[in-house]
Amino acid sequence: MRSDIENYFLHPPADSAAARAAQFGIDLTLTLGNLRLTPEERIRKLDSFIEGIAKLKPLTRLKGPTNATSESLKPSSCLTRASEGRTKTED
C-alpha cells in the first residue's frame, strides 16, 4: 500500500472525512488493515464472519425488556397502552 494512503488514515487532515470519522470514534486503523488485504482476502474474511454468525444464530434467544412483566408483554395490553395516549381527534 502506498505510504501516502497509510499516512492519510494514520494522520488525517483536519478538514477531511477521515478526521471527522476519527473524532466520531471510528477506528481508522481497522479501515487501514482492511485496505492492506487483497480483495480475495477481504472476501475470505467476510465469509468467515458470516459463517461465525450462522453458527451463533441458533444459540440466540429472544429476550424482552428486563423490567417487563408477563402482563405487559401481552399483545392486547401493548395495544391498549398505545391507544391510551391518543386524543379523540387522532382516532
Image: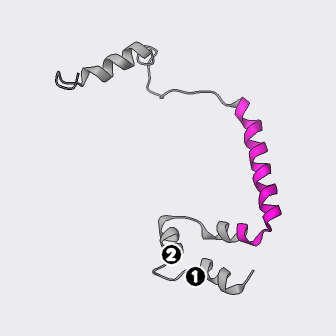
The answer to whether residue 36 is magenta is yes
Which corner quadrant holds the C terminus?
A: top left
Instruction: In the rendered view, tell whether residue 23 sits above or below residue 54.
Output: below
Residue 17 rendering spot, x and y as whole percentages: 50, 73
Marks 2 and 1, how far apart in space?
8 Å
Q: Which residue is mark 1?
A: 11
Instruction: In the rendered view, tell whether residue 22 sits above or below residue 14.
Output: above
Residue at the spot x=48%, y=70% of the render? 23
Q: Which residue is mark 2?
A: 19
Residue at the spot x=71%, y=70% of the render? 35
Name the side, left or right, on which 34 lies relative to 11: right
Which corner quadrant holds the N terminus?
A: bottom right
* Helix, strand or loop status at disc 1: loop
Q: Looking at this view, is 21 or 87 the one in front?
A: 87
Q: Which residues are magenta?
A: 34-58
Q: Amino acid at mark 1?
A: His
Query: Residue 72 appears in which quarter of the rendering?
Result: top left
Residue 85 rendering spot, x and y as whole percentages: 24, 25
